[in-house]
Image (spheres, grey):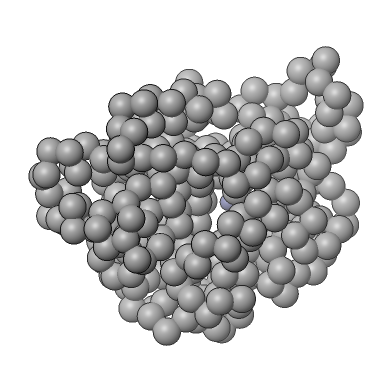
Amino acid sequence: MCYDYKRLNNDIKILTENYPDLISVFSIGESVMKKEIPCLSAGNGEKKLLLIGSHHGLEYLTSAFLMRFLANYTVRLITGSRYFGHDVNALFKKITLYIIPMLNPDGVDIAVNGIDITNPYHRRLISIVGIHSFNQVWQANASGVDINHNYDANWHMIVERPAPSKFGGPHPESEPETRAVVDFVRTSDIDMILAFHSQGREIYYDFDGMTAMRSEEIARRMAEESGYAMVQPTGTAAFGGCKDWFIKEFGREGFTIEIGSGKNPLPMKMLDEVYDENAKLVLAAMEEI
Ligand SMILES: [Zn+2]
């Protein structure tokens, strides 16, 4: 069973009901189809780390990973046991951890469930997807805009009209999902962002030759922990993305993490395979922040 918005909300409900003193949830805004975009937080430290999943519809394995990570982190907090050798109680005191597990809930639901004929977006989305099927190609939001090409960082058009992927929108920050995250980051004084995508087992850490002070050092530590490769992007991956904007606007450490390997959508059963390496990667970032 794929990880859609309904399943996400079910997991959020379970976590926040079981651990009300440790985990809180709030909305950072609404998607095109008016779904609330949830953000979870844990810890009350001075350093602020933001983890983001599912910028892209087919990449919902990143949402499942982030929710499982938060659950396991919380259990270690309660039992006081170490997690992959890390003292999670110390991390909880040092860091306010924010997790936006599914930034693009419409895109995930379109990729997972298709679009019902009674849905007012049906006709338009069918015309955008054309001969392809949603569960093979859909990465964009419900307006056919690729959110990870919609940030204000060397933004320019590579695809000129709404499409299943790579259309950056009519202008930077045109989409409600993009605005929700940039508004949240601008008002929350975030120190570091890890944006999770699939796939490739790679860590991207620069923007247009620009890095923050410790980007390379932290990327190296995450690479050591996870076995993922450090990569400098070229071509379409090189602009308009979340980490690009964060590095450009704040000069702070922003990363894209490409989890797993294979063809999107990665199967849900791959979560077990990619879990440990990515949990270690996140814990490394928490130590380094
Ligand atoms: Zn992606």
Q: Where is residue 89 in the image (x, y as percent from the top left)?
A: 18, 52
Q: Is residue 130 left or right of residue 86?
A: right
Q: Position of residue 96 (x, y in %)?
A: 36, 57
Regarding residue 26, the answer to whether it shows in the image is yes
Q: Where is residue 266 in the image (x, y as percent from the top left)?
A: 49, 38
Residue furthest out toward the top: 118
- In percent of the image, x 36 and y 40: which residue is there? 23
Residue 186, quarter of the rendered image = bottom right
Residue 64, quarter of the rendered image = top left
Q: Position of residue 179 (x, y in %)?
A: 70, 55
Q: In this view, does 120 lie to the left or right of 265?
A: right
Residue 40, quarter of the rendered image = top left
Q: Is residue 213 left or right of residue 95?
A: right
- In percent of the image, x 84 and y 28: which residue is there? 121
Q: Is 213 rendered above or below residue 226?
A: below
The quarter of the image holding the C terminus is: bottom left
Q: Is 110 rendered above or below residue 187?
A: above
Q: Is 88 rendered above or below residue 78?
A: below
Regarding residue 263, the answer to whether it shows in the image is no
Q: How many labels does the image show?
A: 0
Residue furthest out toward the front: 21
Q: Which of 101 and 91 is in front in this view?
A: 91
- In percent of the image, x 41 and y 55: which residue is there? 201
- In percent of the image, x 75 and y 69: which residue is there? 155
